[in-house]
Image: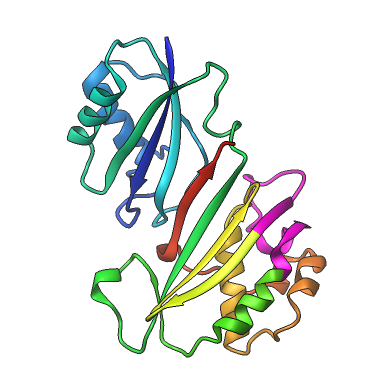
Amino acid sequence: MRNLLLTLSYCGKNLHGWQIQDNALTVQEVFQNALYQIIHEQPDIKGCSRTDSGVHANMYCVSMKIAHPITEDHLMMALNRYLPDDVAVTDIRAVPDDFHARYSCKGKEYVYKVWNSRVRNPFLQDLALHYRYEMDIEAMHREAQAFVGAHDFTSFCTLDKREKGDFTRKVKYFNIKREGNLVTFTVAADGFLYNMVRIMVGTLLAMNNGRIPFGTLLQIIKGENRKLAGPTAPSCGLYLNKVFYE
């Protein structure tokens, strides 16, 4: 029996997140179907996190234990043969028996992409948020530094049955950069709450629009009230970019 760590990359625009659902196609479902075609069994698969409908991943990690003798390289090639075009396995390696894709994770990095132009980019349809207004990148970047550190992020969480207990997370960095018309928001933390990154981005964009005053972000964090923050940005711009295990 081997414990394997698999790294996936996927475009989420036609998929409804990672986790199996009764009436919607998900990444886990297409992955499990492809795996069964190869090893003819269904091992217990552990995903590194949930992702919502329309969210993408440059690096999504899965762990599973299998007894099948197929090599890691042959398994990767076979999976990519059976997976749909919008999902790919980019790496497979053996890990210790006690490794768990979710519970062994030390942190994650997300990227949110905004196409900032009066004219939409047809090649980024459902892959970035189209935002037509001027963006004050420097002001938003300065404001976003209030996120850095350990805080209770209740104001930046959609409350449902997913979230219980301690809402404190430690943000390592939050950067905003422009390359031409493409603006990227990059944030890393030891963990994220439901919709946390999308609400962070939505709040910063609300500040850029003048709906929320600049200089109030720390007050919003300390308020621990979802109503104080801005709207939840659409899922199309969000990418799980890195998963940290060391």
Q: Indicate left or right for 130 with 156 as reference.
A: left
**Where does the image place residue 232, in percent across and percent down from the top left?**
55, 68
Q: Indicate left or right for 51 with 126 as reference.
A: right
Q: Quadrant of residue 150?
A: bottom right
Q: Quadrant of residue 71?
A: top left
Q: Describe the colour scheme in one phrase.
A: rainbow
Residue at horizontal 72%, vertical 59%?
153
Residue 156 lies within the magenta run? yes
Q: Indicate left or right for 243 with 37 as reference.
A: right
Residue at horizontal 35%, vertical 46%?
9
Q: Indicate left or right for 211 with 61 as reference.
A: right
The number of numbered badges drawn on the structure is 0
27 and 112: which one is in front? 112
Residue at horizontal 27%, vertical 25%?
73
Q: Dividing the image into 4 quarters, which one contains the C terminus?
A: top right
45 and 91: which one is in front? 91
**Where does the image place residue 149, in percent across and percent down from the top left?**
75, 58
Give the residues drawn in magenta, as a range.
146-172
Q: Is residue 17 visible?
A: no
Q: Does residue 48 sit above or below 39 in this rendering?
A: below
